[in-house]
Image (cartoon, rainbow, N blue to C red):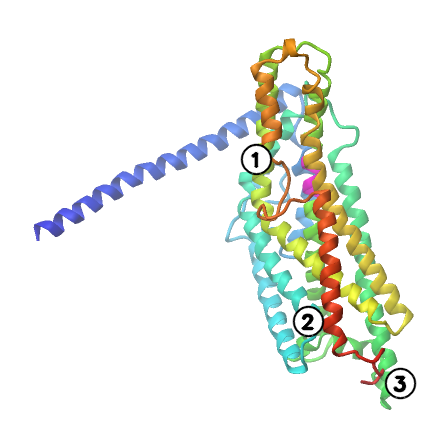
């Protein structure tokens, strides 16, 4: 009896000792956030500018966050606020309700699609729709997880952005906001054309099939095609205008999410690369000058902050990068498979070639944009290697070691990095995977093009 009471007393003491530790940790985190916010405001006041006027990542990415909210992506509250500290993840929010709605409806659509495919039989071509839906569900969850860490990411990023708006850092030739707007508009417009060509190709194939193979030509209408296209929807809902709009809306949401995933990686990479480029320009401006150790120390400290930010972004986005690359490889192979196994109508060739080229360009843009982060992070070495031996101090040696010791860039859980070398490795994987798919598909297409009415 005494022994049991002694054990309970010890456990109570341990719990009491843990409580102050957790409180201290929370207070420490709160103080760090307060110091970051105060530092941001002080730099803005010193520069005579308002935060909303500065060329920051948050200001450039905010329009994309607002659009993403309409599709249940990045469920953040107060996303319309111009102050990044107001934008936070809240479980009870309108954005989270939208995300839950899309996850529910998307999950039902995925289950129904899987049921239809298992009834009709799976092959290398028709399972693409199921993979597309499953990847969409996973990505909604990935962006929800990323939204949870948004506050930890955007506050230090905004603080660093403010630091690099004023001397000794020179402003960029083109603002970050204009770069991100251009990329978003161009890629978004190409994605809309791709989506419209998908429906045009599908309807024309359906139209020709009905025209040549069925006597009931009343099913040639576009509405009949939609009834076939959204068959999983009409197993639960009656065929009417509401159901058709619902099918278009949900399909557009999955397509938007797929494109947004790549666009978001590109926008984030361009933003990080620009800050590393600004830092490199500051170091390159010192070339041929005698630099005191105190200045090298300040420069090295700013570089540490940049690397910590890049590491934080990489840690938060690793799952998104991994899903993006894996999904793009699979879809590229399937689009190429459809082209190599002989398409039937000219509109089919237009759609599949356009979609394949667009996807290849978008995937290359992801790798090339992300590779600029690493390239820009190594630019200061040009200046450091030209420092004469008489001025080669311990602080310079530390800075060189700092630049060369760690790889700076985005990765998929550090299994691979988004670099030019990785892009070529991915292309080699594509060729191998494509040959495998062609062998699988050859079993069902041994004698050329199948019959139109098969």
Residue count near mark 3 (Cα–Cα under 10 Å), binned few <14, some 14–19, many ≥20: few
Considering only vertical position in the picture, is 353 above or below 311? Answer: below
Mark 3: secondary structure = helix
Considering only vertical position in the picture, is 204 above or below 356? Answer: below
Q: Residue at x 60, y 46 (%)?
A: 317
Q: Position of residue 354 (x, y in %)?
A: 85, 59
Return the residue at label 2: 127
**Quarter holding the C terminus?**
bottom right
Q: Is residue 269 magenta?
A: yes
Q: Position of residue 118 (x, y in %)?
A: 63, 79
Return the residue at label 3: 212
Q: Number of numbered discs present?
A: 3
Residue count near mark 1 (Cα–Cα under 10 Å), binned few <14, some 14–19, many ≥20: some
Return the residue at label 1: 155
> Which residues lie in the magenta part?
267-273
Query: If you read the primary sequence from the N terminus, does the residue marked by circle 1 or circle 3 appear first?
Result: 1
State the residue lying farthest toward the left. 2
Query: If you read the primary sequence from the N terminus, does the residue marked by circle 3 or circle 2 appear first?
Result: 2
Considering only vertical position in the picture, is 338 above or below 37? Answer: below
């Amino acid at each position: 009896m005494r022994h049991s009471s002694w054990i309970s007393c010890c456990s109570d003491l341990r719990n009491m000792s843990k409580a102050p530790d957790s409180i201290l940790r929370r207070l420490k985190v709160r103080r760090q956030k307060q110091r970051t916010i105060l530092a941001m405001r002080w730099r803005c006041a010193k520069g005579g500018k308002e935060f909303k006027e500065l060329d920051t990542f948050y200001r450039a990415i905010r329009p994309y966050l607002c659009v993403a909210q309409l599709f249940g992506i990045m469920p953040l509250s107060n996303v319309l606020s111009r102050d990044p500290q107001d934008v936070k993840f809240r479980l009870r929010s309108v954005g989270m309700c939208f995300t839950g709605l899309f996850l529910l409806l998307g999950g039902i659509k995925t289950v129904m699609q899987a049921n239809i495919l298992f009834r009709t039989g799976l092959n290398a071509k028709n399972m693409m729709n199921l993979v597309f839906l499953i990847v969409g569900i996973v990505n909604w969850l990935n962006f929800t997880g990323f939204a949870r860490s948004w506050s930890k990411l955007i506050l230090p990023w905004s603080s660093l952005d403010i630091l690099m708006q004023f001397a000794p850092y020179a402003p960029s030739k083109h603002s970050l906001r204009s770069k991100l707007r251009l990329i978003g508009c161009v890629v978004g417009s190409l994605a809309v054309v791709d989506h419209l060509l998908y429906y045009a190709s599908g309807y024309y194939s359906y139209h020709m099939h009905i025209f040549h193979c069925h006597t009931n030509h009343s099913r040639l209408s576009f509405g009949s095609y939609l009834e076939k296209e959204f068959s999983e929807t009409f197993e639960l809902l009656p065929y009417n205008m509401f159901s058709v709009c619902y099918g278009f809306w949900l399909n557009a949401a999955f397509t938007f999410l797929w494109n947004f995933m790549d666009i978001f990686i590109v926008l984030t990479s361009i933003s990080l690369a620009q800050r590393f480029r600004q830092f490199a320009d500051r170091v390159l401006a010192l070339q041929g000058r005698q630099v005191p150790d105190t200045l090298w120390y300040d420069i090295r400290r700013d570089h540490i902050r940049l690397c910590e930010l890049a590491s934080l972004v990489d840690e938060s986005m690793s799952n998104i990068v991994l899903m993006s690359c894996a999904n793009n490889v699979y879809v590229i192979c399937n689009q190429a498979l459809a082209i190599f196994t002989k398409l039937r109508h000219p509109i089919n060739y237009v759609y599949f070639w356009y979609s394949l080229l667009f996807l290849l360009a978008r995937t290359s843009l992801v790798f090339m944009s992300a590779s600029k982060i690493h390239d820009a992070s190594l630019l200061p070495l040009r200046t450091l290697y030209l420092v004469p031996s008489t001025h080669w101090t311990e602080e310079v040696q530390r800075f060189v070691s700092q630049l060369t010791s760690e790889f700076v860039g985005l990765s998929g859980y550090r299994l691979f990095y988004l670099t030019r070398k990785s892009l070529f490795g991915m292309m080699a994987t594509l060729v191998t995977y494509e040959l495998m798919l062609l062998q699988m598909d050859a079993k069902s297409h041994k004698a050329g093009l199948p019959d139109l009415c098969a």
